[in-house]
Image: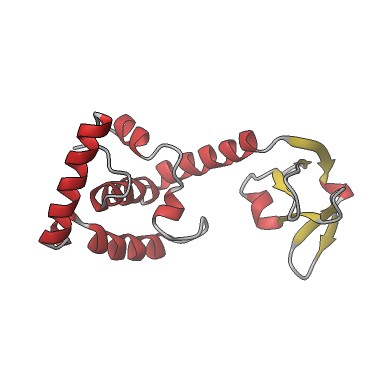
């Protein structure tokens, strides 16, 4: 059995949805299907002997050069990342906590240039999204689904600026 605090360090700064090649709104069946496909592809027991020999030589070489045994491109490391991502996303509570962490990281990553009230944004009913012009000439776009999920930081689609959308949940 693995220690969950240890697991979080192994995949630090990696997006579990990207690791499993699914969207953030994927349902559990889609996540499970992708996990199984990737697990079969990257499982150490499924690799052919030649790849294992080459990987062991690379790991040994890296160990001599870097004094560590981490080969970032190894299939074993990929499999471990896949396993950790699956263990997190299959559990409803862990997934909600992880999604909150992703949202917080997104907020910290982008420097918010302004705070805009949702009422000041134009609502496009056809796409169920709110749009606000950016000073670069492009737009900030946030969907109703994103708002209901708690997202409030929006990046411009044309530059690196972002805004915080101020709104009240009903």
Residue name at image x 27 percent, y 46 percent: 77
Does any portion of residue 170 appear in the rendered image? no
Question: 114 or 165, which is in the foreground?
Answer: 114
Where does residue 1 sit, x and y in percent of width and height? 18, 37
The x, y position of residue 90, in whole percent, is 36, 51
Residue placed most toward the observer, 123 or 102? 102
Above or below residue 29? Residue 110 is above
| Colour scheme shown | secondary structure
In the image, residue 19 lies at what x, y percent?
Answer: 40, 53
Quadrant of residue 40 within the rendered picture? bottom left
Judged left or right of residue 145, residue 159 is right
Residue 10 sits in which quadrant?
top left
Residue 23 visible (yes or no): yes
Q: What residue is drawn where x is 83% and y is 41%?
A: 116
Q: Residue furthest bottom?
A: 126
Above/below status of 27 relative to 6? below
Q: Nearer the viewer, residue 128 or 75?
A: 75
Relative to 117, 61 lies left or right? left
Left or right placement of residue 39 versus residue 96 in this view:
left
Q: How many labels sit on residues?
A: 0
Residue 41 placed where, x, y %? 25, 63
**Figure quadrant of residue 43:** bottom left
């Amino acid at each position: 059995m693995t220690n969950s605090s240890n697991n979080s360090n192994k995949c630090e700064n990696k997006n579990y949805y990207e690791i499993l090649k699914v969207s953030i709104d994927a349902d559990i069946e889609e996540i499970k299907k992708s996990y199984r496909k990737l697990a079969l592809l990257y499982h150490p027991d499924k690799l052919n002997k030649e790849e294992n020999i080459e990987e062991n030589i690379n790991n040994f070489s890296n160990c001599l050069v870097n004094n560590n045994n981490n080969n970032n491109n190894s299939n074993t490391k990929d499999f471990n990342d896949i396993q950790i991502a699956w263990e997190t996303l299959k559990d409803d509570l862990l997934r909600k906590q992880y999604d909150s962490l992703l949202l917080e990281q997104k907020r910290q990553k982008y420097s918010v240039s302004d705070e805009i009230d949702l009422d000041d944004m134009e609502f496009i009913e056809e796409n169920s999204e709110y749009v606000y012009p950016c000073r670069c000439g492009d737009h900030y776009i946030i969907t109703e689904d994103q708002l209901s999920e708690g997202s409030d930081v929006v990046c411009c689609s044309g530059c690196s600026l972002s805004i915080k959308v101020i709104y009240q949940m009903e």
